[in-house]
Amino acid sequence: MQIKIAFCFDENLVNQILVAVASLLDFRDRQDVHYDIYCVCTGAAADVEPRLREVINARDKESVLTMKVVENPYENSYQVRGISTGTYLRLMLHRLLPAVDKILYTDVDVFFQKDLAEIWELSMDEYVLAAVKGAVNLSDKWEWNSDRPYWNHLENMKGRYINAGVAMMNLKQIREQQLERQWDKWAKEKLYYQDQDILNLTCQNAIRYLPPKYNMLAYMGSQDYDRFVSEGIFSEEECKEALKQPVIIHYAGDKPWKRYDTNLGKLWWDYVNSQPDLQGLFDEKKARSYHGPTFGERVVRKLRKMVSKEKL
């Protein structure tokens, strides 16, 4: 089985892509599972290719790497919360990969725990995307977002809004529906969740929902997942499976390479330190010494939010 998977990144995540791809190959349950790995990156990140090929060849000779080095047409799109515009590159996959009809996209801040055979075999004939519902659906978070100027366009997505950090993309349907026209239009707007908002805005009613084990949010603990159950977003069984047997762990909040004590951060570090070709890529001493923003930094952040005319 040859599974097609895509990562999009810029120079800010060149070491992180090595860890993501290494775990993708190391945690295969079946030896007949291999990957066609497509990496779309900016020119400043292209130097990672030789190291990436070494990581892949050391783990699976039948997995294939294809690099696509591009200019980012979205580099002037809205940036917020420290997330670079490199993530917007996924909106180019349908053009960059004209011979590919279906691909699994994941962010680079992920840690794979199992192979992706089960999700890859899902039918996408009637859908544009397949993804996991995100934390934005929780009642307090939805209310907090509700006064954003564009949020009225998402009214029908309450309880169905996806976290797009892991998404199966039906590139054939994206081409046929010419969704790029809508994406380019929305990319000019100030959207708090950036290209994730764009996908939720433009793919409504064409999303297949996946169980949360495929995008287990590391920053959320068992109490948070209990809220998913109590608010009817996921079933109790789905949440238990996500917490105990995640397929993909997504470090969507604090990053383990920046903060060692982030939830499930030790799991990521233990893996990195166990791999000779990944050791030394990150400053573990610095990560261990950081425990989040200082009191002064939190005060400044709060004041900025209070005086800002838009939510940061």
Image (cartoon, grey):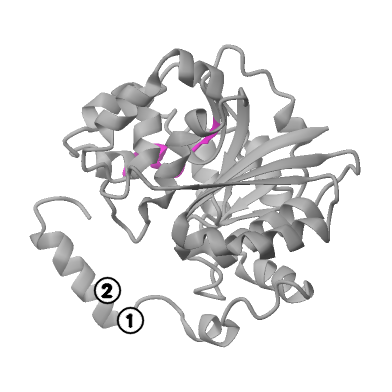
Label 1 secondary element:
loop
Element assignment for label 2: helix
Q: Of the residues shown, which amino acid type is indicated by label 2?
A: Arg
Q: Are marks 1 and 2 in contact (CB under 8 Å)?
A: yes
User: Which image quadrant: the C terminus?
Assistant: bottom left
Q: Which mark, residue 129?
A: none
Q: Which residue is mark 1?
A: 294
Name the residue rendered at 25%, 29% in the picture. Answer: 185
- Callout 2 crowding tier (Cα within 10 Å): few <14, some 14–19, many ≥20: few
- Give the residue at mark 2: 298
Seen in the picture, residue 123 relative to 298 is either above or below; the reply is: above
Coordinates of residue 144 in the picture (x, y in percent): 26, 45
Work out whether residue 32 or residue 97 is closer to the camera in this orientation and state it. Answer: 97
Residue type, mark 1 in image: Thr
Q: Which residues are magenta?
A: 131-140
Residue 1 falls left or right of residue 200: right
Q: Nearer the viewer, residue 30 or 99?
A: 99
The extreme right residue here reads 31
Q: Residues within 10 Å of mark 1 (few under 14, many from 20)?
A: few
For the point 65% across and 39% down, the residue is 5
Task: Quarter of the image for the N terminus: give it.
Answer: top right
Q: CA distance from mark 1 to mark 2?
A: 6 Å
Whole-percent x and y of residue 133? Answer: 50, 35
Left or right, 270 with respect to 299, comes to right
Q: Quadrant of residue 156?
A: top left
From the viewer's perspective, is residue 131 above or below residue 191? above
- Counting from the top left corner in percent of width and height, residue 298 is at 27, 73
The residue drawn where x is 62% and y is 35% is 104
